[in-house]
Amino acid sequence: MPQLTILIVEDNPEDRLLIKEYLAEKQWKSFDIQEAESLQVALDLLPHYDFDVILLDLQLPDSSGVDTVRRLIGEVPETAVIVLTGLQDEDTALQSVRYGAQEYLEKRHLSPTTLTKSIRYSLERKKSLQDKEDLLHDLNHALKRMAQLESFLPLCIGCKKILGGDGRWHTIEDYHHEGSIGNTGERLCPDCKTALSEE
């Protein structure tokens, strides 16, 4: 099973130790754990590691609340962020999720099981969101390519039929079918044919 790289951003050393003990107790994955006691230390670590998960306390010496989440996710939008709150402030935690955190956990309810389940869920959710973004990107790219292709083909702007070499208007299906039937051999332009024959 591949190793996870986790960043714990927490100013309380006892809480950091407890989190590491919880992760070690479940042993469902191997971990490379880095620690930061402030947001700035966390930001300084980001260029040096490819973190899979960041466990983020909302109350840090140099940042607090939703701004902490915004700043961190702005730097690593591809990383799963789990917010840890000791405030029992559900509104702030929910706002954090709206700004891109995958989940939030109240520290008082933290346990080895809840922590590892949250990490597992957050990684799956982040992967699912990334897959959707990749699919949308590919779709947008395909639509742009289609638009470029349409600019090269003699299309009717009304019905989208294509003017064939025979001077008739064809549906896209007929044009493709007739074109593929009539051109089953090698497709080379005159310049390429000349270049090949010279070789």
Image (cartoon, rainbow, N blue to C red):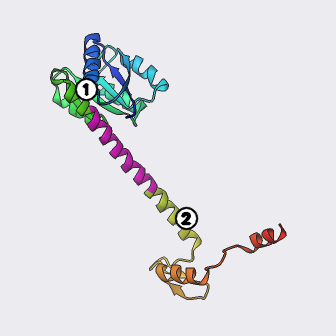
The image quarter in which residue 98 lies: top left
* 84 relative to 34 in the view: left or right: left
Outermost right residue: 198
Q: Residue at x 29, y 11 (%)?
A: 13
Above or below, comparing residue 134 to residue 160 in the picture: above
Residue that appears at 26% across and 35% down: 97
**Disc with the residue nearer the chain's start (1 vs 2):** 1
Across and down, in percent, residue 190 comes to 75, 74
Q: Main secondary structure of the magenta part?
A: helix
Q: Which residue is mark 2?
A: 148
Which percent across, then down, holds residue 139? 43, 58
- Residue 26, which numbered label? 1
The residue shown at (49%, 26%) is 47
Tell me if residue 58 can be seen. Answer: no
Bounds of the magenta span? 119-138
Nearer the observer, 88 or 64: 88
Quadrant of res 130:
top left
Examine the structure image and report whether residue 133 is included in the region drawn in magenta: yes
Q: Give the alpha-carbon distance from disc 1 to disc 2, as whole Å.
A: 54 Å
* Farthest top residue in view: 13
Q: Nearer the viewer, mark 1 or mark 2?
A: 1
Is residue 5 placed above or below 125 in the rendered structure? above
Q: Inspect the image, locate mark 2, and give the three-letter code of the amino acid beneath it.
A: Gln
Helix, strand or loop at mark 1: helix
